[in-house]
Amino acid sequence: MKTRLLIVMLAFSLLLSAGASAQSNTPITLFLTFVPNIQFSPVYVGLEKGYFSGNGIDITIEHGDEPVGVNLIAANQRQFGLISGEQIIAARASALPVISIYQWFQSYPVGIVYADGIGIETVNDLAGRAVGVPGRFGATYSGLTAILGANGMTEADINLQEIGFNAPDVICTGGVEAASVYINNEPLQIAQRAAAGDCGDIQSVSVFPVTDYVNMVSNVVMTNEQTIAEQPELVQSFVSAFDQSLRDVINNPAEAYLLSVRFIDNLPLSAEFEEGLQIAAVEQAIFLQEHPEATREEIAQTRADLWASLSDQFAADELTQFEVLLATIDLWDADQIGISDPAAWQATQDVVIQMGFMTAPIDTAEAFTNDFVPNGS
């Protein structure tokens, strides 16, 4: 076993060194929302494997509130950020020259989670019930508005409760019967607590995903019109590096998790878990090398097999963030990643108008471009 582990560690170190580059690069500050977390793994992978530096870009990461990032990028004080589609639409309605250049999430990551066995079978069954939302802002509020609207309902038809980002606690204590959440995160936490008997009378939960009702734009790579006009090569270099990084995360999540560790405080990684992921990462790299034509479905099956294997070996609390990564990959994965759908931008604008965040529609065709997506224009 020790010999095998030494071989695996050597192979993994070779994987990391493959992208190293030494040249004079363009420094940029990449704006990310919230705080460092596993959902930003495509950025971390691109940094660790040298995709950005290999494309002539030195990146410094900056975290902050999304509206701040939009304003900085619009003023060309920052050139790139990972921002939600509805923010771009609202910004352009205020004459801010921001534009999406790569659709990072292919599925909207929000849905309504609810306890099973309490009489909720359809969205219309939420009528009159207490439904939680972090607040009347952001993707969770947009997603809730979209789901209700698609089912002939409005906020007035439910008992909307602003609960902050505390859906697992509030649902498990009976404060609300359902909540608008990020489907790659809170439902996993609630299900884990229910399985441990730590969620009141709730034994399981289900979700109404936004994508079952409305095709909306979620998070994208955003820049500004000045950067596109004056530095198109920089835009292409950034998008190409991000695209390769995202593909690597989708194809080899064990590697992505390991490469993200130094960027995320307290990411669970015991010595045993690290060893298991190192072995899985190298085995997946070998699989990909031996099967260069592997289909999307075949690669998805390798992720499912990996999850089954890890679930048998490690405790649920140690696997929580890896499970979040796998659930998020499902939201990124598509036959053609990076591409924006014009209809989705129009649908998103309809929701933004419905929420009252803008009054007059814009030309959504000007809010995005697919010209920089590899093989996507």
Image (tube, rainbow, N blue to C red):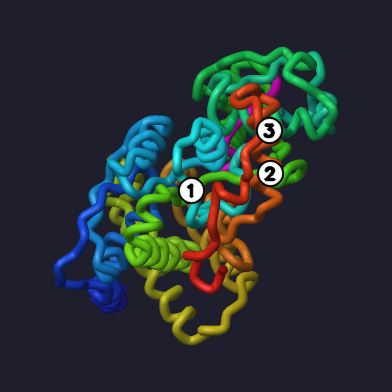
**Crowdedness near tag 3: few (<14), some (14–19) or many (≥20) residues, C-alpha within 10 Å:** many
Whole-angstrom CA distance, mark 1 to mark 2, is 15 Å
Q: Which mark is residue 347?
A: none
Q: On the image, numbered disc 3 is attached to which residue?
A: 351
SS assignment at label 2: helix
Q: Residue at x 65, y 55 (%)?
A: 341
Identify whether 23 is placed above or below 270: below
Q: Residue at x 51, y 40 (%)?
A: 88
Nearer mark to the viewer, of 3 and 1: 1
Q: Quick one: label 3 or label 2, which is nearer the N terminus?
A: 2
Q: Please state which of residues 338 and 97 is positioned toward the viewer in this rendering.
A: 97
Q: Please state which of residues 17 and 59 is positioned toward the viewer in this rendering.
A: 59
Give percent across and percent down for residue 77: 28, 41
Identify the amino acid type marked 3: Val
Quarter of the figure that contains the N terminus: bottom left
**Crowdedness near tag 2: few (<14), some (14–19) or many (≥20) residues, C-alpha within 10 Å:** many
Q: Which mark is residue 346?
A: 2
Q: On the image, numbered disc 1 is attached to which residue?
A: 99
Asked if residue 2 shows in the view, the reply is: no
Give percent across and percent down for residue 248: 43, 67
Residue 230 included in the magenta stretch of the image? no
Q: Residue at x 50, y 50 (%)?
A: 100
- Magenta span: 177-185
**Crowdedness near tag 1: few (<14), some (14–19) or many (≥20) residues, C-alpha within 10 Å:** many
Q: Quick one: label 1 or label 2, which is nearer the N terminus?
A: 1
Identify the amino acid type marked 2: Gln
Whole-angstrom CA distance, mark 3 to mark 1, is 19 Å
Identify the amino acid type marked 1: Ile
